[in-house]
Image (cartoon, rainbow, N blue to C red):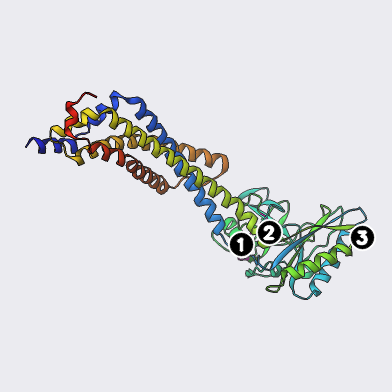
Amino acid sequence: MRTLIFANSMNINIRPQISALRRSPTGALLVTLQVSITLAVLVNAAWIVHQRVAKIMQPTGIDTRDTFVMTVSGSSRKFNIAAAESEDLAYLRRLPGVVAATVSDGEPLTGNGGDTVLWREPGQRGRFAGTAEISTDSDGLRTLGVSLIAGRNFRPDEIQPFRPGSQTPVSEIIITQALANALFPSGHALGKTVYGNTPKPIIGITRNFMGPQLGAPVYNTVLYPTMPGQYGGYRLLVRTRRGEREAVLHVARRHIAALHRYGVVQYTQTLSAAERERDAGNRNVAILLAIVTTLMLTVCCLGIFGLTTFNVSSRTRQIGTYRALGARRRDIVTRFLVENGLILTVGALLGSFLALLISDWLTARYGLPRLDPAYLLGGVLVLWGTGELAAWQPARRAAGIPPSVATRTI
């Protein structure tokens, strides 16, 4: 009967565990602080990793496998940009293996390009959206491998040639579906006019694709019917037949480099390489955060293991006394796991509060989405589970202490 009463009291009464923690609070407080910091970092890091992986998984909407970019710039004021653009496009469109070619001031999937803000009403009023912008001609959509879902493409007569020192205001634009939804959530963006520096009628809407990303939402892209050159150069976008990209790139680079007396080919890049570079940054951040959180979780578990081991070694006679009074092995294990659970619970409460504070700061400072509560709950469960596992082995060792230890001098 005495054994049964003791066992029941061990299972439901946590006052002895609280009393034990109060007698030696330093280690428990340090581990509680470690648990709270680990939880705050763990859940926010996991949330950031989720965002980075989601960015990697987003489709570009562009034929990256068969497209390359060639940047041409003038080495002298004698370089005639408008004539050079026409010569390069005529050559590229005749070149065997080329599906389409266009000239642009932006390079998709990179930070090389412009961005702007478009408004629904003049005077910068009403709904607005940030967007990446690309200047191109009537062959731009075909070069990128992007299709229209509404409206029409630019006509050749609508393309504004480059004129040094002056540029005619844009008369019409083509936008992506994402940008159309951002500006006109109720639909019917086609035919509407949006405003930047000048009114811009929307004549076409494309399926979503990534333009030059300079802080704009990933699929918010606007196309202008203008030939670039105001910064002393331009980019040639070339799409080839499947499997012929490298051969065409080699021939085109050599020919265009020799074609212009006062112009040079600055660099060339395939869009698949640009995509890999874009993903590399997100992938590296995700890997780094995963490593850091794994190390923090490991150190936290070592702290819990060390504290439980210390408590077992300092209470050897006490454990022997409990065994002599009828405590079973599982009662001893339960005692230390409950004690550890109290530390984990307090640490989880503090860590949850700290995690939400960090999330709010990241949202305000870097514009990250607010922490999903499911990640906070998952972090608490993971930390609680691993923390209890860390205390399991020392608790089992405590359960192996024989009752005879109570009669010895330690």
Q: Which residue does the numbered mark 1 point to in the structure image?
A: 60
Looking at the image, do the residues carrying marks 2 and 1 touch, with CB atoms under 8 Å apart?
yes
Q: Residue furthest left?
A: 1
Q: Which residue does the numbered mark 2 point to in the structure image?
A: 108
Question: Hey, what amino acid is under mark 3?
Answer: Arg
Give the Cα distance between marks 1 and 3.
36 Å
Question: Hey, what amino acid is under mark 1?
Answer: Thr
The answer to which of marks 3 and 2 sits earlier in the sequence is 2
Count the labels in the image.
3
Q: For the point 73% across and 53% down, which residue is it? A: 198
Looking at the image, do the residues carrying marks 1 and 3 touch, with CB atoms under 8 Å apart?
no
Give the Cα distance between marks 3 and 2.
28 Å
Q: Relative to residue 320, is residue 285 depicted above or below?
A: below
- Residue 233 shown left or right of residue 65 in the figure: right
Q: Which residue does the numbered mark 3 point to in the structure image?
A: 261
**Can the viewer see residue 167 in this picture?**
no
As helix, strand or loop, the secondary structure at mark 1 comes to loop
The stretch of residues the image draws in magenta is 206-212
- Residue 212 shown left or right of residue 361 in the figure: right
- Residue 160 shown left or right of residue 126 in the figure: right
Q: Relative to residue 401, is residue 245 depicted above or below?
A: below
Residue depth check, mark 3 versus mark 2: number of the one nearer the observer: 3
Q: For the point 58% across and 51% down, which residue is it? A: 282
Residue 167, quarter of picture: bottom right
Residue 210: x and y in percent read: 63, 59
